[in-house]
Image (cartoon, rainbow, N blue to C red):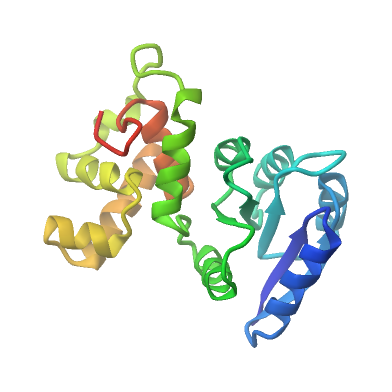
Amino acid sequence: MSIRVMLVDDQVLLRTGFRMVLAAQPDMEVVAEAGDGVEALEVLRSTAVDVVLMDVRMPKLDGVETTRRICSEPDAPRVLILTTFDLDEYAFSGLKAGASGFMLKDVPPAELLAAIRSVHSGDAVVAPSTTRRLLDRFSPMLPSSGKEPQHKEVERLTDREREVMLLVAQGLSNGEIAARLVLSEATVKTHVGRILTKLELRDRVQVVVLAYETGLVRAGGGAG
């Protein structure tokens, strides 16, 4: 079955470009488009979508609030934020709102396609190194660990799970974590699954956000 993609961006030319790239893929189809958040929410009421490519800056309703409303619904599609990075201070808010990851708008087509497939399969952190740079850039927006109480459930993690969580938060993929800790990727995946369950988080992006918010990871990617 094809991955059903929705394009949400107020720039028609950008949507056209993305549509052309996706249309050439045998496993993807663009099933809907919208020029702003209000229109996107309306379309989603009657259209089945797997992955939403979401612009952040749009009229009427921006991508952050639109993402928040989409992700609050049961069986919501995955949302992949599209950002200009250097100008878009709302990208981190998009992750907090429930986005499964983000890509730069000028991303090479091959990387965009890989990101869509990755998000659709449940691997939320699409570009770990980019995620780390973005979070480091906007970490001053987050509460300091001295002012924000630690997430109480973090204390339930084993030493190994905490170690894996810190590496996830620093932007490492399962393969990189496996190499770092001399474990199999399957074992790392199991640890990540347990972390998500214990912390009641949806995906890896939420692990990253929580680690920064609670001060487990500092700006620069180091452990807190």
In the rendered picture of this protein, how many numbered marks are placed on residues?
A: 0
Residue sitting at x 71%, y 68%: 5
Q: Is residue 39 visible?
A: yes
What residue sits 84% from the left and 57% below the top? 34
51 is higher (above) or lower (below) than 114:
above
Q: Residue furthest front?
A: 86
Residue 103 drawn above or below residue 135: below
Q: Give the farthest residue toward the top.
A: 147
> Is 126 drawn above or below residue 69 in the view shown?
below
Judge from the rendering whether residue 178 lies leftward or rightward of residue 33; answer left or right: left
Quadrant where the image shows the C terminus: top left
Image quadrant assignment for residue 44: bottom right
Q: In terms of image quadrants, where is residue 66?
A: top right
**Would you identify the image quadrant in which residue 86 lies?**
top right
Please indicate, yes or no, whether residue 200 appears anywhere in the rendered image.
no
Left or right, 85 with reference to 221? right
Q: Where in the figure is residue 103, as x and y percent of width and height?
A: 56, 57
Q: Residue furthest left?
A: 182
* Residue 63 place in picture, x, y as percent: 72, 44
Residue depicted at 76% across the width and 65% down the height? 48
Work out which quarter of the rendered image holds the N terminus and state it.
Answer: bottom right
Across and down, in percent, residue 114 comes to: 52, 72
